Amino acid sequence: MTDIIVLGAGMVGVCTALALQDQGHAVSVIDRRGPGQETSYGNAGIIQAEAVEPYPLPLDLPTLADIALGRTNNVAWSLGGMRHWLGPVLRYARNSLPHGYRSRIVPAWSRMIHSATADHGALIAASGAEDLISREGYRKVYRTECEFAAAAAAAGRYQAEHGVPHRLLDGAEIAAAEPGLRHPLAGAVHWTSSWSCKDPGALVERYADLFERRGGRFLRGDAMSLQRQGQGWLVQADGGAVEAERAVVCLGPWSPGLLARFGHRIPMVFKRGYHRHFGVEQGPRLPMMDVETGTFLSPMTRGLRVLTGAELNGIAAPPSLRQLQYSTQAAQQLFKLGVPVEDKAWMGTRPCLPGMLPMIGPSPRQPGLWYNFGHGHQGFTLGPTTARLLSEAMKAA
């Protein structure tokens, strides 16, 4: 017998199932694929304890001009995709204005981020996943002195306002820390409190195994088949229909599509990202973000994962590899890459809500339907934390 259906087996969905299970509920997780095989698989693998402020839309004219004219690799867009993202991006811009962003969004976001490593730590220990985790932090590196100086000032503010520790490295120090580095850098900010994972999909699988060992059920099925069944909910899975009194939507970028069927109109900025693995003899010792080229380099089990910035597009748009090609060239400047591991690149979509905060709580229109989605760039980081918050809200309801 299932009390609660969780739709989605990414980091957020699996953690939600575990948190509800801890309260004594019989939980079934429904997904069309295995645990951690969508967006949760393809990220940089960083549990970002330093990310105490969500990414606002840059509102200065030079940066906006660079984005509009395609002069930056951090953000890409196309005219064909504008109908999907223009409205939500304008709302996102309004919420990026300093007053509301600083007074409302940052305090709520930072409280969640400050809990992230502790919440993950409990699950890492219980699931036996220590072999996947490094607690040495990661580095943001800068090619120019002016960008490094600005980053150092911002890091100082993060430490003063939020208590986030860091270490600054000049060009000589980062070269000594990374012997495989082939290109001189102005400096780096080493975010020392963040953790990294060498196989993000495998971490979700370990959490899912823990859920099943504790009596939970994982079923392959179509989350989009969710429908009302009396006072509860029904979804189709392999082996037949699953019914429960309550259902939780943890479908990331696919959540608005499902909820539109129940009268919910949820604007979302779909930020697509790409990655590809490469063999490398002497890659970075720690994960590294090359900020000015919009490129992230993460040492993974499969090789060095080269990741891109954000592409604004519709969720079903065909792939565009321009950003990944640029990021691969940038990575090749920094380290000597070998051949690609995969035949083709991976792509996935970050679910960014215009208000920047995830939706956690009950549906205002459908009794028994709950939300936990819209984590933007931080679903991997915040999965256990928002799961805990949701379970607490459901218990109090």
Image (cartoon, rainbow, N blue to C red):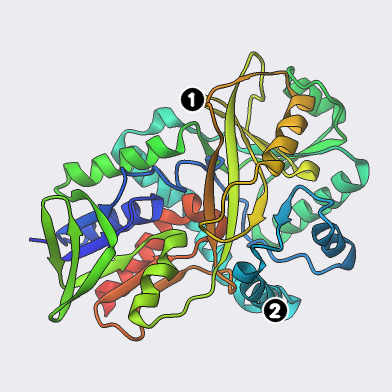
Q: Nearer the viewer, residue 51 or 282?
A: 282
The residue indicated by pointer 2 is: 94
Question: Which secondary structure, mark 1?
Answer: loop
CA separation in Å, label 2 and label 1? 40 Å
Q: Is residue 34 above or below residue 130?
A: below
- Identity of the amino acid at label 2? Arg
Q: Farthest residue toward the left?
A: 1
Give the residue drawn at x 19%, y 56%: 28
Residue 88 has which mark? none
Residue 106 at least partly seen: no
Residue 26, image x and y in percent? 14, 59
Q: Is residue 10 above or below residue 58?
A: above
- Identity of the amino acid at label 1? Thr
The residue indicated by pointer 1 is: 301
Give the residue drawn at x 67%, y 76%: 95
2 or 1: tag closer to the N-terminus: 2
Residue 168, image x and y in percent? 78, 39
